[in-house]
Each structure stands twice: as structure tokens, then as C-alpha cells.
């Protein structure tokens, strides 16, 4: 019966580590990076050409 507590402990530790890793990944993905507020494309609006 000594294997049963070892198995239960291993499964419990693995589950806690998996939940912690998942929460860490979610926290990293939820963090917003600092981005400059500059447009990638600008258009000239001085005159209209047809």
C-alpha cells in the first residue's frame, strides 16, 4: 500500500503545477504590451486627384 500514497501525491503535485502553469500563461497573455500610438499607414489629404 505504499505506492498508493506516492501515486496520489504525484498526481496532486502534477495537477497543481499544471494549474499554476495555465494561470501563468493566461496572465502573460493578458498583459498588454506598450505600443506607440502611431498609425502604420498615413494618407496625404492635401488635394483630391481624379
Image: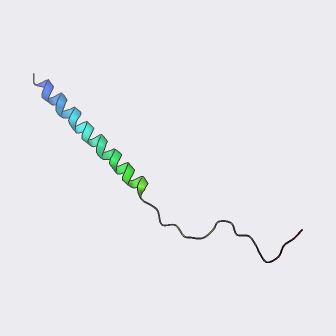
Q: Residue at x 56, y 70 (%)?
A: 37
Q: Nearer the viewer, residue 49 or 40?
A: 49
Image spot of residue 43 (x, y percent): 74, 70
Q: Quadrant of residue 31?
A: bottom left
Image spot of residue 16 (x, y percent): 25, 41
Q: Residue at x 10, y 25 (%)?
A: 2
Q: Residue at x 30, y 43 (%)?
A: 19
Answer left or right for 22 relative to 44: left
The structure's colour scheme is: rainbow
Answer left or right for 1 relative to 24: left
Q: Quadrant of residue 32?
A: bottom left
When the figure is inspected, residue 38 is found, relative to residue 13, above or below; the finding is: below
Image spot of residue 20 (x, y percent): 29, 46
When the figure is inspected, residue 17 is found, relative to residue 44, above or below; the finding is: above
- Residue situated furthest left in the rendering: 1
When the figure is inspected, residue 18 is found, relative to residue 27, above or below; the finding is: above
Answer left or right for 22 relative to 11: right
**Quadrant including the C terminus:** bottom right
- Residue situated furthest bottom in the rendering: 46
Q: Quadrant of residue 1?
A: top left
Q: Nearer the viewer, residue 23 or 14?
A: 23
- Residue situated furthest top in the rendering: 1
Answer left or right for 1 relative to 46: left
Total numbered labels: 0
Amino acid at each position: 500500500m505504499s505506492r498508493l500514497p506516492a501515486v496520489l501525491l504525484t498526481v496532486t503535485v502534477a495537477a497543481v503545477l499544471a494549474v499554476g502553469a495555465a494561470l501563468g500563461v493566461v496572465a502573460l497573455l493578458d498583459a498588454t504590451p506598450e505600443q506607440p500610438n502611431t498609425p502604420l499607414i498615413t494618407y496625404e489629404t492635401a488635394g483630391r486627384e481624379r
